[in-house]
Image: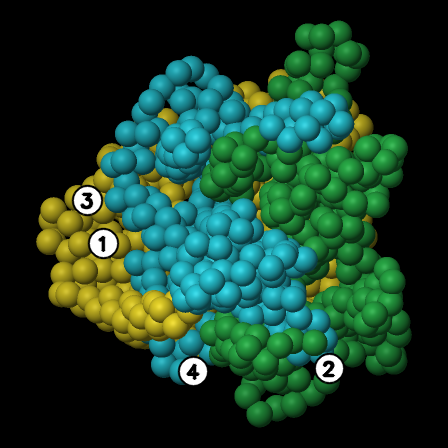
Chain colours: A green, B cyan, C yellow
Amino acid sequence: MASPARSGRMLLTAPALAIIVAFMLLPLLLMAYISILEKGPAGGVRWGAHTVEAYVAFLFERDLADELVLNTDYLRIFLRSFWLAGLTTLITLAIGFPTALGMALAPPRWRTFLIFLVTVPFWANLLVRNYAWIILLRNNGLVDQARHAVGLGSGPLDLLYTPVAVLIGLVYSYLPFMVLPIFASLEKLDWRLVEAAFDLGARRWQALRRIVVPLAMPGIVAGCILVFIPGLGAFITPELLGGGKALMIGNLIQSQFGAARNWPFGAALSFALLALVLLAMLAYLLRYRAPPGAER
Amino acid sequence: MSPSSLRFPGLRAVLASFFVYLYLPIIVLVVLSFNASPQATIWTGFSIDWYGRVLDNPDLMRAFRNSLLIATTAAVGATVLATLAALGTQRRQGGAVDAVNAVIALPLVVPEIVTAVASLLFFIMIGLRLGLGTVILAHLVFCIPFAYLPIRARLEGMDAALEEAAADLYATPAATFRRVTLPLLWPGLLSGLMLAFIISLDDFVITYFVSGPGATTLPVYIFGMIRIGVSPEVNAVSSLILLISIAFVAASWVIGRLKR
Amino acid sequence: MTVRIRAGAVGMAMLAMLAAGGAQAAGELYLYNWTNYFPPDLLKKFEADTGIKVILDTYDSNETMLAKLQAGGGGYDVVVPSDYIVPVMIEEGLLLEIDAGAMENFKNVASPFDKQWFDPERKYTAPYMWGTTGFSYDSARVPGGALEESWASFFAPPPELHGQVAALNDEVELYNAAALYLGVDKCTESAEEAQKILDVLEKQKPLLAMYQSDGTIERMIAGEVIMHHQWNGAAHRTREQKPSVVFVYPKEGLNFWQDNFAVPKDARNAENAKVFINWMMAPENIAVASNFTGYMNAIKGSEQFMDAALRDDPAVVMPAEYADRLSPAKDCSEKARELRNKVWTRLKK
């Protein structure tokens, strides 16, 4: 496969791997250990006292007779976060792909400028951006007023504090993470290929599906990972725009290190999440990674 | 201009509406920084007082400087490491590459609060003194995947012929990198750098835990306001940051023009 | 390529230096507090008076501050913990004994703040601000112009208010309010009582517009909601711009909280911290802080330096007849906390 000259290249991954192993994997192992410790009476943990209680508590609780019974509260919260992150990923992809295509087709001297332009809004703080959305979306807010001014309905929109508002906010927050990777992979596209396809009588959708999308695939995958996984942990936007009526994985785990002072359970919840994400990735690899030499 | 753009006539409109969506809240945010009212979201009149307050608030200014310093250092560092890693896995498949990708994606998968507490415990354990340095280190780690994925997406399927041709012409590896690889990589590199930068600039939870005295950043400062009420100072300081970013954009625009 | 790697190594070395650096000179004070909870001008006055330079760092809740100190993060000289978290910090050995009770300006501390359950001899803490958590409503928009002074008005509001009520998005505050409403111990260890609290909260949930802790002032002024579960200082700021708003001291009792100055064990400038804490117990200084935060302090004689609007607001200076309605915070047992968190999770599952 790789020529001997290139096999040394693998070494280039060493600095990044070293940093991540030292300052991410090692701390994570420490956390794994914490997840099997007993929680301390005032928070923190009891070093040396082991239990798997935290993992049991993810799915079961003790009823009054001290029997273990199934408790689906945490699963439902997990499901909600997965659903929301998935929906956000689909919508950012639907908006992000044509946008990235438009950017890639812009004149070359525009392109660096466009990359900056996509990220500028995100230099402003997350909280402040969400407040701006509240002002736009709330009843009698700017969107409402604009709608009334052009004569589209008269009553309040009742958009803020609904799942739609949460999606608007989340999609907004994650758009650059979808647009830029797709743009980066589309920009190298040799448009002569597309032209040739058109010359051969291909229709627009065929050209897109057969040539553009396959070439953009690495960017699409990267974008989906960068939106979906951080989206799983998102909770500030859902809380501010959704009215705080439903917990997300993010604030469930956060509260274990906060008001609940139950570090082991917080750690166990994280490893449950980690396991689910790894399973999803594995499923993706098994399903879509074609065996070597096979035609895709 | 590429003739293909003519084949997709709706794209201009898509691009335009995308940027309207992107900039609508930003316009609101900047307008409200000129609000006279102490309540950020209720307009009462025009005033530039909040800018005066920001400039006169040494703690807020320090948080502002810390944020920019941390985000710049971490994003640049992460982009360098990510570029090396992406070049290392370029045009390779198989178990080793999958393993590398999995390790690099790790900081993405772990919930922030867990990374935060784990990093803090770990830093204390190995005797690091908390401060700006520990914050930069933690940011560097979680920025790497955000820089790596766009760069790798860029590299994947890229033609090796150019680099090999350069090598055949006896170009040194360094020259090949500078003259051939880097220009080819540029859109991915810049995308990765910018994504790493904005993700670092927005981080609150990890920063909060691994920071030491004097290392408060803007998000930590702003979240601390929740109990007392967020003031338009925050809009003003965000607008100042936007101003800096717009200076960058303007510079890139001018440079883009000059190159032609 | 080697050039790049070397550049990376230099970067790492610089990082290490940054991490090791940051040593403090004499004459500094690292204050760890909520954002916007201390007037910047007062810090400047302190610097002018004493020559000690104050550097402010911020946090967003008692619990995150505790978690950070428990994990060993520190280096701060003064922290501002609330009452219920103080015994935990003492027990965990996180606080330095500063004997605030023996400080020169401690004589200014009003009763009952000189002796408090969480630190009876004031060995570790000195008072900063105190306040209450009740609810407020816009009297112009409720039927009859007034509501009963009871948590019932909040947990079971009249039909006109349905969908126009907001609760604090705060596990502890909301749970405590429901416990007070039911007359149940807020640190109950009984599953049946916790279930009753959950029932109240679940019944209220569909009537609420939202759970939200920030922006309460704006939401009330803008009229987005008619009633808001609120801290009294926030209610005061709401009333400044919307005088028709009333802050309610419910007859079943309401949460009474006190924030305190304390010195962490690993403080590097403990002497400066004591100077600061003593200085803050002078009426003319603490009054500036009250004017800025909108909360009442515990220092005798500070009223004369306070803004009239603040001094005259019953939401801030509690009318004497309500004194028996105050329900001091307490730190709940492990079991009680677990029940509380379960109720919270089930409410929002």
User: Mark 3 to mark 1: distance in Å?
Assistant: 8 Å
For the residue marked with disc 1, what is the amino acid? Answer: Val
**In terms of depth relative to the viewer, which is nearer, C163 or A25?**
A25
Of badges 1 and 4, nearer the viewer stands 4
Please report the residue visible at 80 percent of the width from the left and 28 percent of the height from the top. Answer: C159
Do badges 1 and 2 share one subunit?
no
Is mark 1 in CB contact (under 8 Å) with mark 4?
no
> Which chain does the residue under circle 2 lie in?
A
Percent of width and height locating residue C266: 30, 74
Q: Which residue is mark 2?
A: A53
Q: Which residue is mark 4?
A: B125
Q: Which residue is mark 3?
A: C44
Q: Earlier in the sequence, mark 3 or mark 1?
A: 3
Please report the residue visible at 53 percent of the width from the left and 51 percent of the height from the top. Answer: B184
User: Mark 1 to mark 4: distance in Å?
Assistant: 29 Å
Q: Which residue is mark 1?
A: C54
Please report the residue visible at 55 percent of the width from the left and 21 percent of the height from the top. Answer: C244
User: Mark 4 to mark 2: distance in Å?
Assistant: 26 Å
**In terms of depth relative to the viewer, which is nearer, A40 or B19?**
B19
**Height in image: C84 above or below B184?**
below
Question: For the residue carrying disc 3, how many other residues have a C-alpha within 10 Å: few (<14), some (14-19), or many (20+)?
Answer: some
Question: For the residue carrying disc 1, how many other residues have a C-alpha within 10 Å: few (<14), some (14-19), or many (20+)?
Answer: many
Question: For the residue carrying disc 2, how many other residues have a C-alpha within 10 Å: few (<14), some (14-19), or many (20+)?
Answer: some
Of badges 4 and 2, nearer the viewer stands 4
Question: For the residue carrying disc 4, how many other residues have a C-alpha within 10 Å: few (<14), some (14-19), or many (20+)?
Answer: few
SS label for mark 3? helix
> Which chain does the residue under circle 4 lie in?
B
> Which chain does the residue under circle 1 lie in?
C
